[in-house]
Structures are given as structure tokens and as C-alpha cells.
Amino acid sequence: MKAEFAVALAMGALATMPVHIDAHHSFAAEFDITKPVRLTGVVSRIEWTNPHSHLFVVVTDDAGQSTTWKFELASPKVLVQQCKWGPAAVNVGDQVTVEGARSKDGSTTGNARVITLADGRRVSAGSSGGDVAPPR
């Protein structure tokens, strides 16, 4: 009886502990495939994190106004193993072109589909938005 009480007490304690859970979203929940974006700019920051990596790109318009865009990529593991590129392929200061879908909220956030790296390679961003597009 004492063992059953101890197990019940332990289970009760575990059930009341705060738990941090990262919810994963679907592509369609945050991004709009009907709002394509294609921007060229300079990489200002890279986050190799799970569940998604992020690429921050400073885009300067014709009037000289600069805006930082945040693009969601696949996880580091997917980028390295399936897309065949990783942290060594892109650096802060590199000029890149990002093609993808804009966020539904109209912010300067997007889901990258294809990235043209500084060396000219077009690589998949591993997103659910699609793979590498054919060269133009």
C-alpha cells in the first residue's frame, strides 16, 4: 500500500510541474503561398536553431531605405543532410537572394524556398514551401 501511495504521489507531482512545449506550426498557418517574395540583400544574422533555422537579410530599396527580413528555413539537420548545405555556406556580410512566401500578417517575415548563395549556387531552404526552382 505504501508503494502505491508513493507512486500516486510521484505521478501527481509530475502532473503539476510546469512544462515547456514548443508548438510546431504548419506552413499554411503562418505563410501565404499566394504572396511570393524574391529579395536580394546582405546577411546580417544567421540562427542555426531547432525546429527552424532563420536567415536575417538586410534589403535596401531604390530610395536607400534598409529593411531587415527574417526568413524561416528548415532545421540545421535537414539543411545539412537533405539540402546539402550548412553553416559554412553562408556568412554574415554575404549577398544572397531569397525566394519564398511572405507571412500572412504582412510583416517582413517569410518562409524561404530557394536561396541563391554568394557563390551563385541555388539551394533549397528545406521548407514545406517547395524545393529548388529551375534556373531562370
Image (cartoon, helix red, strand yellow):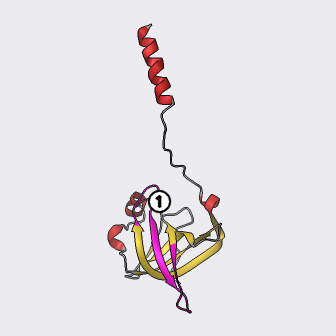
**Who is closer to the viewer here, 11 or 40?**
11
| Residue found at x 47% / y 61% | 74
**Who is closer to the viewer here, 39 or 3?**
3
User: Would you say residue 113 sits in the magenta stretch?
Assistant: no
Q: Viewed as shown, does residue 106 lie left or right of 9?
A: right
Question: Residue 66 location, x and y as percent?
Answer: 51, 84
| Residue that protrudes farthest toward the top in the picture | 1
Q: Viewed as shown, does residue 21 lie left or right of 88?
A: right
| Residue found at x 52% / y 77% | 134
Question: Residue 111 location, x and y as percent?
Answer: 55, 67
Q: Could one spot residue 132 in this view of the protein?
A: no
Q: What residue did someone put label 1 on?
A: 52
Assign a secondary structure to mark 1.
Answer: loop
Instruction: Tell me the quarter of the picture where residue 31 sits.
Output: bottom right
Magenta span of residues: 47-69
**The N terminus, quarter of image:** top left
